[in-house]
Amino acid sequence: MQLQQLAYFVAVAETRHFTQAAEAVRVAQPSLSKQIRALETELGAPLFSRARGNVTLTAAGEALLPLARRILADAETARREVAELAGLRRGRVRLGATPSLCAGLLADVLARYHGDYPGVELRVEEGGSRDLVRDLARGQLDLALIILPLQSSDPALVTEEILRENLVVASVSDRARRSHMRIDELRGRPMVMFRRGYDVREATLAACRQAGFEPRFAVEGGEMDAVLRFVEAGLGIAVVPSMVLDNRPRLIGTPLVPGLRRTVALAHRKDVEPTRAAQAFRATLLTFLTDAARDGTLPAGIEALATSRIPSA
């Protein structure tokens, strides 16, 4: 089994068309077909069904696809790691992060890292923890900032708790500011709710149900920026991470009683050692949190958990 064959297989699986796949990988279509047949012969099973001109994956193809993607991603990571060791002063960090972190402190961390390592390519994937964990398992990310705890069905990951953040009720700032709000006071209030897959959505639903009621949605299905804009427009209130209200003067955040908090961790696959570029990012992140905690510049509602550690690249 060759990496080239796996790359051809993935291309056909994604396009469901042999000619288009050949164009995507820049090879003649007969050569691609020949390599696919050789791969099927070696594996002892057909990977595609070609009935009536429609190309679909067989059961064997469905089983191979996630493994092939992961193998190809790991091979690319290996190439880049060797290039770093060869002293080429380049590399890549593929980082996943939740929307609240992308809208909050992550930009400052990335700016510091880019200043220290300008030759390293940075790729950021924004999404909910479930999506980020899946992408880590597939080898599509090197590191991810996710919400704990992990589910029992999640792949084996190494997690490092780095901060804890409060969830607050966001509302328009012309309302009277309150010191706190009880969970049961959300009963019957119109709420702006995140799309499925957001960790904040699940935390909000769980807290409301524990208090004995189902929340009433005025709007449902938004991303972070959309939810905040809908609240600003007066469509309802929303439970959000406190850090996202920085630079949102039209919104106020009211703490909940009992408090809702969540823990953010830096995660990577257990079976793959992070590249030197990824290790350097970890060191930069921990140093940034340590400095911000010392200087009192962390966003409101954030507690750094990594300030006692000595970062090491």
Image (tube, rainbow, N blue to C red):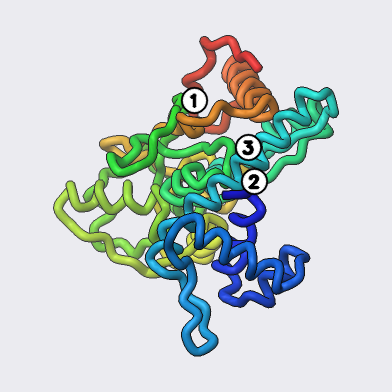
Count the marks: how many?
Answer: 3
The residue tagged 1 is: 162
Which label is found at residue 299? none
Determine which residue is flagged by label 2: 124
Q: On the image, which quarter does residue 129 sit in? A: top left
Q: Earlier in the sequence, mark 2 or mark 3?
A: 3
Q: Please provide percent x and percent y for residue 16.
A: 56, 75
Q: Is residue 21 above or below residue 179?
A: below
Residue identified by numbered label 3: 106
Task: Identify the image quadrant of residue 104.
Answer: top right
265 relative position to 255: left or right? right
Point 25% across, 63% down: residue? 188
Residue 240, above or below 25: above
Q: Disc 2 vs disc 3: Cβ atoms closer than 8 Å?
A: yes
Residue located 54% across and 62% down the image = 226
Label 2's element?
Answer: strand
Residue occupying the far left of the picture: 212
Farthest residue toward the bottom? 52
Label 1 CA crowd tier, 10 Å (few <14, some 14–19, many 20+): some
Q: CA distance from mark 1 to mark 2?
A: 18 Å
- Up-down relation of residue 141 to residue 108 (above or below): below
Residue 313, visible in the rendered structure: yes
Residue 195 seen: no
Q: Say which element carries label 3.
A: helix
The part of the image, by quadrant, that contains residue 109 is top right
Secondary structure, mark 1, is strand
Q: Which amino acid type corresponds to the residue marked 1 in the rendered image?
A: Ile
Circle 3: residue type: Leu
In this view, 205 is above or below 177? below
Front residue (pair 15, 307): 15
Between 136 and 1, the residue placed more toward the observer is 1
Looking at this view, is 115 or 190 the one in front? 115
